[in-house]
Image (cartoon, rainbow, N blue to C red):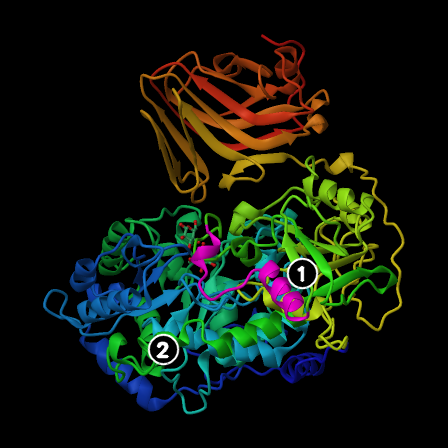
Amino acid sequence: MQYRLATSVAAALGALLLGACSSNPEATSTTNNAAVPDYWPSIQSPIAKSDEVEKKVSEMLATMTVKQKVAQIVQPEIRDVTVEDMREYGFGSYLNGGGSFPNNNKHATPDEWIALAEAMYQASIDDSLDGSTIPTMWGTDAVHGHNNVIGATLFPHNIGLGAMRDPALIEKIATATAKEVRVTGIDWIFAPTVAAARDDRWGRTYESYSEDPEVVGAYARAIVTGLQGDISDGNIDDQHVVSTVKHFVGDGGTEHGDDQGNNIADEETLFRIHAQGYVEGLGAGSQSVMASFNSWHGEKLHGNKYLLTDVLKDKMGFDGFVVGDWNGHGQIEGCSNDNCPQALLAGLDVYMAPTPTWKPLFHNLVAQVESGEIPMSRLDDAVRRVLRVKVRVGLFDLPSPANRSLSGDKSIIGHPEHRAIAREAVRKSLVMLKNNDHLLPLEPNSKVLVAGDGAHNIGKQSGGWTITWQGTGNENSDFPGASSIYQGIRQAVSAAGGSAVLSVDGSYDEKPDVAIVVFGENPYAEGNGDIANVEYQRGEKSDLALLKKLKADGIPVVGVFITGRPLWVNPEINATDAFVVAWLPGSEGQGVADVLFTNENGEIAYPMQGKLSFTWPATPYQNPINRGDGKTPQFEYGYGLTYADNTNLPMLNETVEADSSEAADHVIFQQSVQPPWQLVARVNDETGTMNSSVLTVGDMAIRTADRHVQEDTLLMQFGETPATVAFFAPFPVDLLDFTTPNSALAFDVKLQSGTGIQAGIACGDNCAGMVQLGDFMVDSNEWQAVEIPTKCLIEAGANLKEVYASLQLSVKGQAQLSVSNLRLTQHGKPTTHCP
Ligand code: BGC
Ligand code: BGC
């Protein structure tokens, strides 16, 4: 399939080649930006600056107090701000984070969403305490549909949409998303993500449309247009929302694919690869940009004046506002969540301040403006930008959230027309990697066995950012109106006189004509999804066993792979006859069967047409791997078989040659517990698994805490009762890579109190290697790096071939310790003997 360069990308590149970029006369600042290279274009937003709007904003600004101004640039989160806080402070905006709902109720109804929007709005325009009547604005992460709301249409995640190469459909998806969001009284969304993910070990790869900036650019334009609607009259109407292009800039290009990591690209590469979504998204008029958590050459974007101000605002001419990411300002050197004038000075306009620290942050900012540390002109510019967008989105003219045109029309949430768009996207996003002997399409009047833990699991097929932040903990019943992949298959075959039997483990009474096995990654979000290499089910391979068993029984096997990124699945592909990548299709699982089966007359109703928008690796250790980098992939960028193709895929290489020079650490906990590990605690007979930021079992508690970045630390408090804490996997994990001489179990620890703590590895019933933690520490209650050589754990009885707990702690009585940066490494200190 041909991919057409969006005209505006072509124009921008053309201008670049001609050296024709001129500086933007509309630029808001007079800063001399001579130092910004000319390849950063000046962009004409379709919303031209209007004197009338500027006059209105100036009039408002002239009457505002410092406190009222600062309130416009501090954005708290609904779990940590009340309606009464809104009345008292009059915040310019607020958000709900992923998995955050009105009244903390996952099942909150649209009416409850509207009620909160209405109460917050009314409190914001109530001037009794803060003297301000400026309406507030609500921002939400509607990143694949209105994904925090029960019953909403869930579109495929961006990686699947990338495989469609269909900007027109993207625009329809965005239009539908805007409507569903408007029903709940919300006016602003934190999407699209326009990252070009270059290293698929990154946990946010699925939020990226493509590794290729052309696809990202064309889609950015389409989605911003769909979300904001026709803005040629200078206004976003009440059927549309304010969009956010995020995360500026370079989030998809960090070293090792680390979430919130460091991007070391040179500036031109930063522009050419990572900034095209901004060129196009701002060219389509996006009114906000979110600053990224990542660094560029070691400097956090939230504090990068050159990129935020000189490039984005002055050179590119962006006149909307820059919103921060989740306490991202607190990560700037010298800043904390509650104190960070640096971010505003660098060009951030709105602080995303989700924790209770919004309060000291607010008061510190007020004091810093009053002392002159923050010039009034910078504060005024930030507030002007916020107010300008509020005027453009009609906040001063529209009725209150409960009384807007779409509010409360519940029929729009999960509307059949929106579901039809999503289902079309599912069909177009499927990428077929293998179809030996034309097994697909299947005839619907067959006996089909549907196996695998993804077959009837809408949560799994929807991925992260689905009702909950991580997308975990959902049941099929949390998705009214949705269909699983199995339900789609059942419908297709039963309509044609066939039969579909669901059997997760693949067992059957009557031998089927064909088996469809739906399997793949479990949901994750952000850093939680970072992985050390791209081997699927390393050390486990239970899905491979299932595929092999069915094939050994002589049943033709179709693999349907649910995944947020290309993974090394050569053994799994070899164990199938046909292999289709479904990505993270979302709520309309039926779209899969639409393509896998012919219609009742044996005709192909929907073509198999998706093409990889990411390069597929040939080994687990090839990342980063991208089009044109000279590496030999398993499947090239753009690959994808159609039903017309006559290709039989030969057996693929299954041997894994670990690249020892690059032997990566096996991360167990870093900001989040990494799969397959789960944090489990046991006190007496009571056991609990950590799946939020707090775990309490008996008289012990673990909570997440912030050390360098948010949630990178586990604070453990033990009471009198002996307790065990383990990073546990439900199946044995092979960690034999970490038996080399310098291998160690390594972590940072701060032991505030407690003695006699044992640490080690557990390998099943009566199998463990435990040592005294104190023997590997210095006597101090400050943070320190601990390395326990695996050699010592093996001497103490650990079997690293079958590890069930990669770190187990046994605590006999009261203790308090913090742990972070937990991993197995081959690069520990040399050891001679064990204590
Ligand atoms: C994510 C953003 C998101 C924000 C609000 C952050 O952790 O990086 O993409 O918009 O949270 O939920
Ligand atoms: C929020 C997310 C956010 C994340 C960042 C979660 O608690 O719900 O929206 O992105 O924290 O750490």
- Along the line of sight, the residue nearer the viewer: 824 or 142: 142
Quadrant assignment, res 636: bottom right
Residue 459 visible in the shown view: yes
Q: Tell me which residue sits at (50%, 76%) in the image.
A: 418
Residue at the spot 68% in from the left edge and 29% down from the top edge = 734
Q: Is residue 316 visible?
A: no
Q: Residues within 10 Å of mark 1 (few under 14, many from 20)?
A: some
Real-space CA distance between mark 1 and mark 2, rounded to the nearest whole angstrom = 55 Å
**Amino acid at dot 1:** Ser
> Where residue 544 sits: x, y (%)?
73, 43
Q: Is mark 2 within 8 Å of ligand 1?
A: no
User: Which secondary structure lies at badge 1?
Assistant: strand
Q: Position of residue 429 (x, y in %)?
A: 66, 68
Compared with residue 788, is residue 297 higher up or lower down, i.e. above or below? below
Q: Which SS does the magenta portion mostly show?
A: helix
Kind of residue at badge 2: Val
Q: Residue, x 42% and y 56% (percent of image)?
A: 98
Q: Which residues are magenta?
A: 474-496
> Where is residue 558 shown, x and y percent of the image?
75, 56
| Drawn side of residue 245 relative to residue 647, left or right | left
Q: Can you tell which mark lies on residue 554?
A: none
Q: Residue at x 84, y 65 (%)?
A: 438
Q: Where is 200 relative to 766, above or below?
A: below
Which dot marks residue 389? 2
The residue indicated by pointer 1 is 499
Q: How many marks?
A: 2
Q: Which image quarter has ligand 1?
A: bottom left
